Image (cartoon, helix red, strand yellow):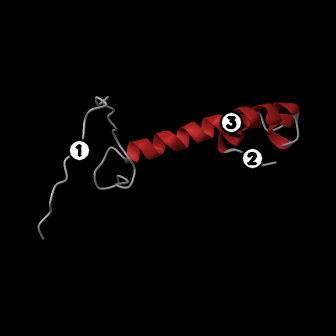
């Protein structure tokens, strides 16, 4: 069983003599561990989103904003000639 960081943090708030802190197979620790997976994923997503707020650390390969527009069925795109 993978131990998630949030579960370890939560279990360390209990006294050292409790099973939740000393035994990773205890019911309390297993409950914390099952709840910690989505918390850790959310924390990681927030960390990445926070890094993307600064231009120096932003992932430029990641799409930031997308727009959607409904075009009429009669619309045709015009070819643009590029000169090099």
Q: Which sits earlier in the primary sequence, circle 1 or circle 2?
A: 2
Q: Which residue is mark 3?
A: 36
Q: Residue at coordinates 68% horizontally, 36% vertically from top-left? A: 36
Q: Tell which of 37 and 61 is nearer to you.
A: 61
Q: Which disc number belongs to residue 14?
A: none
Q: Which residue is mark 1?
A: 77
Please identify the quarter of the rendering in which residue 67 is found: top left
Q: Nearer the viewer, mark 3 or mark 1?
A: 1
For the residues labelled 1 and 2, the Cα–Cα distance comes to 54 Å
Q: Left or right: where does residue 31 sit relative to residue 77?
A: right
**At which x and y percent is residue 28?**
82, 31
Q: Which disc number belongs to residue 3?
A: 2
Secondary structure category for the residue under label 1: loop
Tell how many labels.
3
Please identify the quarter of the rendering in which residue 49 is found: top left
**At which x and y percent is residue 43?**
54, 39
> Residue furthest toward the bottom?
84
Q: Residue at coordinates 66% horizontally, 44% vertically from top-left? A: 5
Q: Quick check: can you spot residue 46? A: yes
For the residues labelled 3 and 1, the Cα–Cα distance comes to 50 Å
Please identify the quarter of the rendering in which residue 59 is found: bottom left
Q: Which sits earlier in the primary sequence, circle 3 or circle 1?
A: 3
Q: Which quarter of the image is occupied by the C terminus? A: bottom left
């Amino acid at each position: 069983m993978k131990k998630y960081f949030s579960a370890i943090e939560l279990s360390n708030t209990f006294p050292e003599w409790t099973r939740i802190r000393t035994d990773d197979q205890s019911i309390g620790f297993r409950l914390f561990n099952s709840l910690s997976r989505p918390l850790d994923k959310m924390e990681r997503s927030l960390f990445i989103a926070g890094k993307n707020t600064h231009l120096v650390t932003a992932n430029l390969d990641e799409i930031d904003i997308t727009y959607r527009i409904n075009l009429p069925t009669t619309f045709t795109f015009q070819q643009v000639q590029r000169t090099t």
